[in-house]
Amino acid sequence: MNAARAQHKGRGRVAWVDVAKGFCIIMVVMMHSVLGVEQAMGHAGFMGDLVEFARPFRMPDFFMIAGLFLAARITAPLRLYVDRKIVHFAYFYVLWLTIQFVFKAPEFAAQLGWPGALGFYLKSFVDPFGTLWFIYHLAIFFAVTRLVHGRVPFWLVWLAGAALEVAHIETGSMLIDEFAARFVYFYTGFILADAILGFAARIDRHAMLGVAYLAIWGCVNAALVFGGVSTWPFISLALGFAGALAVCVFAVLLVRTLAARPLKYLGAHSIVVYLSFFLPMVVTRQALLGSGLPVDVVSLIVTCLGLIGPVLLFEFTRRTGWCTFLFERPAWARIDRPGHAAPQKAAIAPAD
């Protein structure tokens, strides 16, 4: 894992990784936007097919990249590791869970009564809520990986993770089900970081190899998705890995083009978008439902504003210094403070 460690320590950032994460956060916002619009308008459009095409790889790639640079931190002092990899995500989960609940509380109260709504909020500390499950599981994945590292053979952990994904566990608990479905991708990013980075470097040197891979993968992914077999055991696991690598290839090929610039920005601030896209998405959707526009046009506008809204909010807080706690962890929410380790800025960080 020396290459992963060296790239992590020697950066700024790895540009193609940010491009890949930027692409994935667009896919995530698109999914929530399109499915919400189609449900509200009562019929599907072309963008629904794009969402379905991305289903096998949308989250696997995010989690695989999240584990990619963990080798540089896995043996860090425990206090530092817990602060940066667990408390960090826990803070933003609790904060944005509370913000989302404030907006949705009247709706919950109408359905469940205020005691029931409060109970639902408290339950969300145990079983993750809505779109925030990704943040919740990142903290769990970092914790589990630290616990097993050096204690359990890596191949045994990987096999257990793969078995959980293949089992397609459906208990109704998002905590259990998403852990089972996603941990193998995160752990693969961790243990195969050098191989993934080396593969990306090879694609960078041989672009036509990357183009060929994307063409073959795209045809196979589409055939299996629209053929209705992409969710079958083993096939879902294979498509998850193949699609995650395809996103990496796409990012490497795109990284030197002008089109990569907005993707780099979104990737570098992917968690900012993930935390806060729900509000502009919902507001825009409600505003456009009676507009008479076609479903795909509404879906596209909602997706775009779901991405732009968080960026505007983040830049506002950064430039004005107001409400910085929304995206920057304050000192009181840290356990690794000056005196325990060298002072470092507690700003929100990508899931690296």
Image (spheres, rainbow, N blue to C red):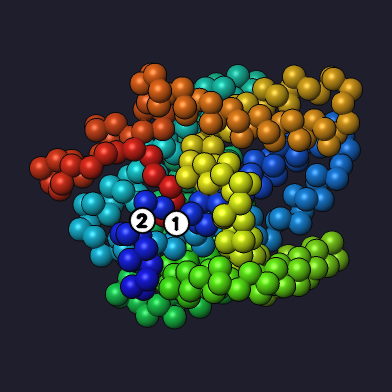
Measured from the top left, where is residue 311 in percent x and y? 53, 31
Quadrant of res 76: bottom left
Name which residue lies at 62% across and 56% down: 254
Pinpoint residue 109: horizontal percent, then vertical percent: 60, 22
- Using a 10 Å C-alpha cutoff, classify the residue at mark 1 as few (fewer than 14 neighbours), some (14 to 19) or many (20 or more): few
- SS class, disc 2: loop
Q: Which residue is mark 1?
A: 14
Q: CA distance from mark 1 to mark 2?
A: 7 Å
Image vertical order of residue 345 relative to residue 246, above or below: above
Q: Where the N terminus falls, by quadrant?
A: bottom left
Give the secondary structure at mark 1: loop
Residue lying farthest left? 339
Identify the disc placed on residue 65: none
- Check the image and report above or below for 116 versus 204: above
- Residue at 29% x, 75% y is 150
Instruction: Give the percent coordinates (x, y) of residue 213.
Output: 69, 72
Residue 330 placement, left or right of 245: left
Q: Is residue 84 left or right of residue 273?
A: left
- Is 168 situated above or below 309? below
Mark 1: amino acid: Val
- The residue that disc 2 covers is 11
Few, some or many residues within 10 Å of mark 2 (<14, 14–19, 20+)? few
Q: Amino acid at mark 2?
A: Arg
- Screen quadrant of the C terminus: bottom left
The reply to whether callout 1 and callout 2 are in contact (CB within 8 Å) is yes
Q: Residue at x 75, y 49 (%)?
A: 51
